[in-house]
Amino acid sequence: MSAKKEFSVKWGMAIDLDKCTGCGACMVACQAENNLAPQADASNKRRVMNWLVVYELSNGKAFPDHEVAYLPRPCQQCAEQPCATVCPVVATERNEEGGIVSQVTPRCIGCRYCMAACPYHARYFNWFDPIWPKGMEKALTPDVSMRPRGVVEKCTFCHHRFMQAKDVLRTKGIDVYTRAVDGKHHCAIPENGYVTSCAEACPNGAIVFGDLNNPAHKVYQLVTGNDNAFRLLERLGTDTAVYYISSREWVRRLGDNYLPDEETQKPQQILPKKH
Amino acid sequence: MKFVAGASAGIMATPVPWKLLDDVSIWTQNWSWIPRNQYGESTYAHAVSKMDPSGVPMRIRLVDGRPVRVLPVEDHPLGGGLTALSVAEVQMLYSPGRVKRPLLRAADGGFTELDWPAAAKILQEKLTEAGKNTAFISGDESSSTNEVLSAFAKGIGSDQVFFMPSEGQCASVAARLMGLEAQFGYDLEKSDYVLAIGANLLESWGTVVRNRRIFKESHPHPVRSAAKGIKEAAPMAVLAYAGSVQNNTAAVARPWLPIYPGSEGLLALGIANMLIAKGRVVDAADFDAFKALAAKFTPEEVARLTGVDPKKLEAVVEGLLKAKAPLVVVGSEFGQGAGAAPLMAAFAVNALLGNINRPGGLVLMPPAQTAMPKAEARSGMYAKDLASWIGTAKPALLVLHEANPVYALPDPESVAAALKNIPFKVSFSTFMDESAALCDLVLPIGMGIERTDDMESPYGCGGSVYCVTPAVVEAEQDVRSTANALLFVARKMGMDLGFETLMDLIKAKAQQYGKAKFDVLASGKALVDDRTVGPRGLKLRADILGKALQPAAKAKDALCLAPYAKLSMGTAKTGIPPYNNKTLRAGDLDGTAMTVLMNAATASKKGMANGDRLLLDSGRRRIAAKLRVYEGVMNDTVAVCLGFGHTALDEFSQNKGANVMELMTAAAEPGTGLSVWTGTAVAVSKA
Amino acid sequence: MEENRHCTNGGKSRSKCACGAVPFLAGAIVALAFGWWVFPDMLFSKEAQPFFFSHGVHVNDVGAACADCHSFREDGSFTGLPSLAACADCHAEVMTAEPGPDATAEQRTRYEAEKAFVEGYVSQGKEVPWRAHQKQPDNVFFSHAAHFNKCFDCHLTMQGELNLGKPDSPQKLCMTCHPSLEKLDKNPPVELNALTDYSRTTMKMWECEKCHAHPGHFYNDGKGRTAANNACSTCHK
């Protein structure tokens, strides 16, 4: 595994599981934004393409003590990617300011090693040609290219919106990266200038998107030192950019495979400061 | 031979093999049947979703004039995000289920296409012929189109103009029975304790996006730090939920009070009794009668009737009493069929809490206005009960506007049979739904973003609100709007309804609402009016409540049926939008079989296990399903999701489960004139 | 195989081998000729623009800058080919004076072309089906804004071969990548690849990498970052 790349700007999410009601608006917004093709029968989940999935979590207790929570799962944008390291054709990598793991489908050969490697099941194999009902192709956005059958796809944090937000700044003559008062480089894109489609659609404000390295951003404030924050399978050391927050311990415990007598851990406790 | 060898060697020194290899690989990445990106300038237009009943303001992104995305609107009293249904609106423009041009039933039973002038002529003939024996059903409660429908009906001597059943209807009838000339409004914004009983506030009740924005604003993200000594901030407002299914609202509500389906009104009466015991009174002429009725609903009795945990209920009532602005919202878990009595009981509870017309309380909004001279008020249309009428009435002509009674009313099979007995049926519909497929004349209307329309105070809002939605894009299909088609026919029939087009009517209405300019409203501005009307002449109507609020009769080994709604599964009009069936979780559908939910205790009582094939039998009809054990369901209850079992529309909606409405039968609610179907019992057996 | 054995066995057969080189060479020459001259013509079709259009007239005679027609939108995206509305700002009516009897052939061509444009497109409100020389493949996100700002931030001032100098003519910025169409009075035909449908002048990735992977672009921060980022998603969507 190559050395982990650190970037001044690290786009990330804080997903508030106490707010998510599991309505699915984010999933539909994601498909519409990223030009995913619909499927008439979407009941066989092994064949269904979804970049973002909302999982149902249960506290495992019987009625009436049962609690339910919903967990939206985009690509976790790991800093230590299990996927990129196994890709034989460098079709996926994390090599750009912002720390988003790219997925270049024209380069992908569909071997699916990355799918086997991804512990989050965030990667999907395209089993079918992307065909829309007649005429619906007119509602496709120009921002994301269509992917043919036989390649692996995944969430890109709506990377095209990042590109567009940078272009807005450039046209106004504003530098994209600026040195802020804390002496570090930050992105000059305003906090609401680059938001993923899922975060934008959610009426509950369950998905907060921004720069995990920028103290002015809400996402930074929500995850830094928050005992209610956790990441999925933290102890694998994937160092993901998607944090979840919940005041319920049973929800936080579902984020990792804890033994019954193990204590629920916080992100800071698990990862050493330096790798 | 050597020539070929030389040629082979030579060709290697030319670009031919290499260029071809490269080009072929590029060729394989751009198959002609895969669509390509189409570029152009991005522009944005404001609209209000007419497809989503919860009244969602939207910003439509167009690329080179083509709508491609629905985006949320923050700066709007009903805005702040999107629902899983409204976000799919531009894709629905191209739904395979759309009606493309007017269709007329031919002698062989199929449809033949015709043009609008011919269709209008047939419509005119049939309307003239049927005259006062014409009935109208509207599936859009908030549009001024209803004024055109009712004024037209009046013009031909008919008063049979119905709405599809809704929560708004239950509330309107409740208000009328209590002597109030008002629409119930809910000031969720300023409330600090909201108890929703049955009302699926964050998914299908009222102004969903607004409700959810208020939930977002009142619930800070849970931040806690032992190191920095930061404790978690308490929510600014409590959201408590009482209902039989741990649905989308119950998932985030604290606490969830499980109750039997259909017992919402009984729980409200129980709460009323507890409040009266704490010395709360209501300034109403018949308060003593109400007090006497409520006294029967002791905590023990309420626990027996509703299944609620008395301790949890007591804590909630304490919370309501302590709150500065408590608010109790009662509704049906699936947005229909609750009747008026539970809403009347809820009004009494709110009155006992002293929050009528107070900030954060239950607001009595002035009734929706009419601008068309002969139009009937919305409350007048609400007063007519469709479910009981449709089985008995025999109109000569039925006109549907965006309504799909054959799918959405209880016992759809009987509704279909009733429709078949009507000699001529017309459907103004965007999609070829179950009802349109039964009609003799199907007239395509544009989707909300293809037509100019308006939205007036949708049920659940906190104050009068009026929005206009302009045509953002021109329809590719040969469509008209229902209102304009009827206004055209009216002129041909020599009727003067006062307006030439719906646009003129909307302009007049905008003038009525604070002299607003149409263009300003069409650019996304909402007109808000916070005026209230006093609860003068309030009667609590214990006489009706006592009769109407009875525990549902149920055979001993039957289960309560708890239907629940998800906006993601669309409405009866739209079916499941193409992208939305992917939001079904693994196990929600097994092939074409739908899943129903029971808790483990109920399942084991019935000798059933997760994955069993079941039959749900109402005595009249039965549906097949697969059992999923889900602990978030009340005891002795089986929960079934609405929106499955479409037989019309398109491949995204069809071949998925069964329509739970099949199991329900409308029963008369004593004293209110409405029908109820929230308290259905079903026998469940292994298939 | 039989022949080969003869070659290695005896003198007689050696002379036979020398004769064998002739057809081999002939074959090679034919193949080379085919590969280098005939094949490109077979692979690429030549498509003319819908009517005669001269960049030269607009740039040299009218004094237009590239950005007058090919401009940025407010959201930072690039318009590329101008819309009919943009053209109609000037060409609402035929602007060229009707050529007199002593007009040159060139003047006539220009007049006829503008007349065809105004009558065939402007007055009918029909968008011109221009043939684009450089259309991006779908999987490419190309930001004109990024190149205008980032590249020229350094390259307008730095010393050395890539110094583009002061933008005394604004065209210079564009000509770094685009052919100098302003010198041509007639657009060259658009050559479309029969297999891929991309034009011949569509840049290949290695051409992008001339800058994006240029060693001179590496920052000295030891993190392997470059001024012209060469990460996949910098250019791909």
Image (cartoon, rainbow, N blue to C red):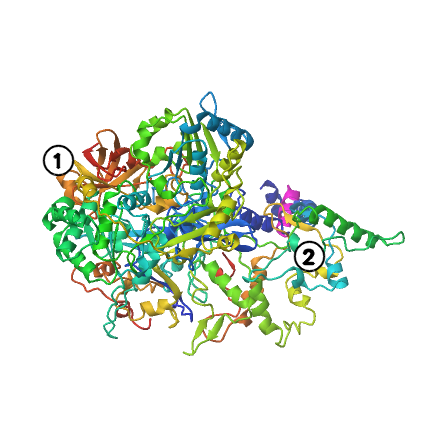
Residue C122, x across and y down, in percent: 69, 49
Q: Which residue is mark 1?
A: B556
**Residue C40: image location, x then y, percent:** 67, 49
Mark 1 burial class by Cα count in 10 Å: few <14, some 14-19, many 20+? few
Quarter assignment of residue A37: top left
User: In this view of the protein, can residue A2 be seen by the observer?
Assistant: yes
Amino acid type, callout 2: Asp
The range drawn in magenta is B1-13
| The N terminus of chain C sits in image quarter | top right
- Pointer 2 residue: C89
In the image, what residue occupies the spot 37% across and 73% down? A215
The residue marked by circle 1 belongs to what chain? B
Amino acid type, residue under disc 1 in the picture: Lys
Above/below status of B668 relative to B269: above
Residue B7 included in the magenta stretch of the image: yes
Q: Label 1 to label 2, Cα distance in Å?
A: 81 Å
At a point 72% along the width and 53% down the height, the residue shown is C92
**Residue A64 seen in the figure:** no
* Helix, strand or loop at mark 1: loop
Subunit that carries the residue with mark 2: C
Residue C38 pos. (x, y %): 69, 47
Res. C161 mark: none
Of B430 and B605, nearer the camera is B430
Q: Quadrant of residue A226?
A: bottom left
Secondary element under disc 2, as helix, strand or loop, is: loop
Q: Is residue A269 magenta?
A: no
Left or right: residue B687 compared with residue B8: left
**Nearest the camera: C168 or B460?**
B460
In the rendered structure, the answer to whether residue A12 lies left or right of residue A65 reads: right
Residue B549 image position (x, y, % from top left):
19, 42
Q: Is residue B28 left or right of residue C62?
A: left
